């Protein structure tokens, strides 16, 4: 009692004071208490993207819109912040899996992985591997049954076992520096590099 932090799903939640700071900023920016997709893109400096990049950003937004009403409310926003800032690796990998599983069928095929990685490279300029090399590497390392599709279990287990792969996947979707900028009242760089934050 009297503890300003709570735990949910085995992770430490954002402290009450910090939640209040986020709430004030969210409500000042979105007085209706709801953030639209357009506002999300504006907040992150993501205007003028190509079609694939736009689809990916839409998918990121939709994974944060947990009740699928077309808006991000404060509870959804703070849950996303909590995942990014304090989430355990397994929770983050589940979220990455949802992003990669573009058609929502519960598995990732080579085309989905290739498309998402091409988009990530477009957005953040990451050039460690070509999208084709990355896709081949992932399927070679973690597609245990060689069926050309990755299940959630294969994705999580395989990624956790391969530190190089884990680093590439994690780096592609690290929002922590963007959140720090927002919290401090500054706008992110609009150079299109919101996804690769170190």
Image (cartoon, helix red, strand yellow):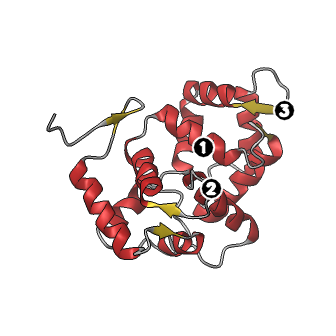
- Spatial distance from mark 3 to mark 1, Cα to Cα? 18 Å
Q: Element type at marker 3?
A: loop
Q: Residue 104's spot in the image, x, y percent?
A: 74, 44
* Residue 90, position as x, y percentages in the image: 51, 32
The label number, if any, that marks residue 148 in the structure image: 3
Q: Which residue is mark 2?
A: 68
Quadrant for residue 127, please give it. Answer: bottom right
Q: How many marks?
A: 3
Q: Is residue 188 above or below residue 195?
A: below
**First along the sequence among labels 3 and 2:** 2
- In terms of sequence position, does the residue under pointer 1 or pointer 2 come before the other? 2
Extreme residue toward the left, this view: 2
On screen, 184 above or below 151? below
Camera-side mark, 3 or 2: 2
Query: Percent position (x, y) of residue 188?
Result: 43, 71
Numbered disc 2: secondary structure:
loop
Residue 198 visible, this orientation: no
Q: Earlier in the sequence, mark 3 or mark 1?
A: 1
Q: Quadrant of residue 96?
A: top right
Query: What residue does disc 1 label?
Result: 96
Residue 100 rendering spot, x and y as whole percentages: 69, 46
At x 34%, y 75%, the residue is: 28
In the rendering, which numbered label is found on residue 5? none
Residue at image point 38% right, 47% down:
85
Tell whether 189 sits left or right of 160.
left
């Amino acid at each position: 009692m009297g503890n300003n932090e709570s735990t949910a799903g085995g992770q430490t939640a954002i402290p009450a004071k910090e939640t209040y700071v986020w709430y004030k900023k969210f409500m000042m920016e979105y007085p209706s208490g709801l953030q639209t997709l357009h506002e999300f893109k504006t907040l992150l400096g993501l205007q003028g993207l190509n079609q694939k990049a736009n689809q990916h950003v839409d998918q990121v937004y939709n994974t944060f819109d947990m009740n699928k009403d077309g808006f991000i409310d404060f509870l959804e926003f703070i849950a996303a912040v909590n995942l990014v800032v304090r989430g355990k690796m397994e929770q983050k990998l589940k979220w990455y899996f949802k992003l990669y599983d573009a058609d929502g069928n519960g598995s990732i095929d080579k085309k989905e992985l290739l498309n998402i990685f091409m988009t990530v490279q477009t957005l953040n300029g990451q050039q460690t591997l070509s999208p084709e090399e990355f896709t081949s590497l992932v399927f070679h390392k973690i597609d245990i049954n060689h069926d050309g599709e990755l299940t959630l279990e294969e994705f999580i287990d395989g990624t956790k076992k391969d530190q190089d792969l884990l680093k590439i996947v994690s780096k592609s979707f690290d929002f922590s520096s963007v959140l720090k900028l927002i919290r401090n009242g500054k706008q992110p760089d609009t150079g299109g590099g919101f996804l690769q934050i170190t």
